[in-house]
């Protein structure tokens, strides 16, 4: 009889299982207050950022790491799962820069995560590598080490952070929204579009064989013809889906910088169906997001690709140009 290999990261903890479960139980008590804490600060109503969302992120991370070449150690699995539990807990202080304020909650949890400050700091760095939508510096993962040692164990912070960030991006689905609040119109107008977006996404398929991620959306006709408030303007739900799929594509490209040696995805496929009262959709839309054609010209030429040339250390912070090189050579000849 063949044995089915578990896909759940929690079954790969080994000796770290009891430590993880102790930490999980403590954090989940606070996660139940994340949405209400954010509402009290921001005055809105987030899609779910509590225990159910964490469960979904763990599922997505488990699916992403179910790759032939992915070789996370038991200790790396522990760090990743701990970071997943912490990644949104900063929302309890409000949505703004929640990936930064999570350190306040993480420090408060303290020894529940680990009595060692190096371990706690690493977990919070991995958790903080995801960004809020309004955060200016989105390049957070490149600041982490590709490899280090913690308590004499090899750890790959950049890889773990990229897995978490991409898994989180693929976890904004139906269960994060309240169908009752949507259908009764009880949500504040400023957040309706985000709940409708989550509710429309009913399936995420991570296919390692095709190296594609599929997103399946369903829209009711009455929601498809309405406009919703967003950032002081109006937008249709389809336009929000198009925009969100673009963001997921960019997050895939960004994640691949750090995980392509062990996990590879080449495209995002999107399927959208619009339904009226009947069983069959009245509209179908499908498209694929992947790199194609000649790359776009970088905004500042080679200095965008190699920013160290703009303030070159070997030239005392001067920009590397032909004129500067000539000046340096002529200075030596004088």
Image (cartoon, grey):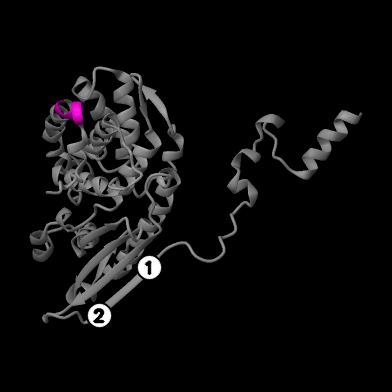
- Name the residue at 41% across, 55% down: 250
Q: How many marks?
A: 2
| Residue 33 locus on image (x, y percent) | 13, 38
Residues at circles 1 and 2 in contact by the CB criterion of under 8 Å: no
Question: For residue 16: magenta?
Answer: yes
Judge from the rendering whether residue 300 lies leftward or rightward of residue 290; answer left or right: right
Judge from the rendering whether residue 109 lies leftward or rightward of residue 125; answer left or right: left
Quarter of the picture holding the C terminus: top right
Question: For residue 28: magenta?
Answer: no
* Residue stretch rendered in magenta on the structure: 14-18
Q: Which numbered circle lies on residue 248?
A: none
- Name the residue at 17% across, 45% down: 55
Q: Residues within 10 Å of mark 2 (few under 14, many from 20)?
A: few
Cα gap from disc 1 to disc 2, whole angstroms: 17 Å
- Name the residue at 19% across, 26% down: 15
Mark 1 or mark 2: whose residue is earlier in sequence: 2
| Residue 226 locus on image (x, y percent) | 23, 73
Nearer to the camera, 234 or 18: 18
Q: Quadrant of residue 19?
A: top left
Q: Which numbered circle lies on residue 283?
A: 2
Instruction: Please determine whether, in this image, residue 49 is positioned above or below residue 116.
Output: below
Nearer to the camera, 193 or 186: 193
Provide the secondary structure element on which disc 1 rests. strand
| Residue 71 locus on image (x, y percent) | 33, 38
Provide the secondary structure element on which disc 2 rests. strand
- Main structural element of the magenta stretch: helix, strand or loop? helix
| Residue 114 locus on image (x, y percent) | 23, 21
Q: Residues within 10 Å of mark 1 (few under 14, many from 20)?
A: some
Given the current orientation, which residue lies at the most extreme front position? 1
Q: Which numbered circle lies on residue 288?
A: 1
Judge from the rendering whether residue 17 lies leftward or rightward of residue 326; answer left or right: left
């Amino acid at each position: 009889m063949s044995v089915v290999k578990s896909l759940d990261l929690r079954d790969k903890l080994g000796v770290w299982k009891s430590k993880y479960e102790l930490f999980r139980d403590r954090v989940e008590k606070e996660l139940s207050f994340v949405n209400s804490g954010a509402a009290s600060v921001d005055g809105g109503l987030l899609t779910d950022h509590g225990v159910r969302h964490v469960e979904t992120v763990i599922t997505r991370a488990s699916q992403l790491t179910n790759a032939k070449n992915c070789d996370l150690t038991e200790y790396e699995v522990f760090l990743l799962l701990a970071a997943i539990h912490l990644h949104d807990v900063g929302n309890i202080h409000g949505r703004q820069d929640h990936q930064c304020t999570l350190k306040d909650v993480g420090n408060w949890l303290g020894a529940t995560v680990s009595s060692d400050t190096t371990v706690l700091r690493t977990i919070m760095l991995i958790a903080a590598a995801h960004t809020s939508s309004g955060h200016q510096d989105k390049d957070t993962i490149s600041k982490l080490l590709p490899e280090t040692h913690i308590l004499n164990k090899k750890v790959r912070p950049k890889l773990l952070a990229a897995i978490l960030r991409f898994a989180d991006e693929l976890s904004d689905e139906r269960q994060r929204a309240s169908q009752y609040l949507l259908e009764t119109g009880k949500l504040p107008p400023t957040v309706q579009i985000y709940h409708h977006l989550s509710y429309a996404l009913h399936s995420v398929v991570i296919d390692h064989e095709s190296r594609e991620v599929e997103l399946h959306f369903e829209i009711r006709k009455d929601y498809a013809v309405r406009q919703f408030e967003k950032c002081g303007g109006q937008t249709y739900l389809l336009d929000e889906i198009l925009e969100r799929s673009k963001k997921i594509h960019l997050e895939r490209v960004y994640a691949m910088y750090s995980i392509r040696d062990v996990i590879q995805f080449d495209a995002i496929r999107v399927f959208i169906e619009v339904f009226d009262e009947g069983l069959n959709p009245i509209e179908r839309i499908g498209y694929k997001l992947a790199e194609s054609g000649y790359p776009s010209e970088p905004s500042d030429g080679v200095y965008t690709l190699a920013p160290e040339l703009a303030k070159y250390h070997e030239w005392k912070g001067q920009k590397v140009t032909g004129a500067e090189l000539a000046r340096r050579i002529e200075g030596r000849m004088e």
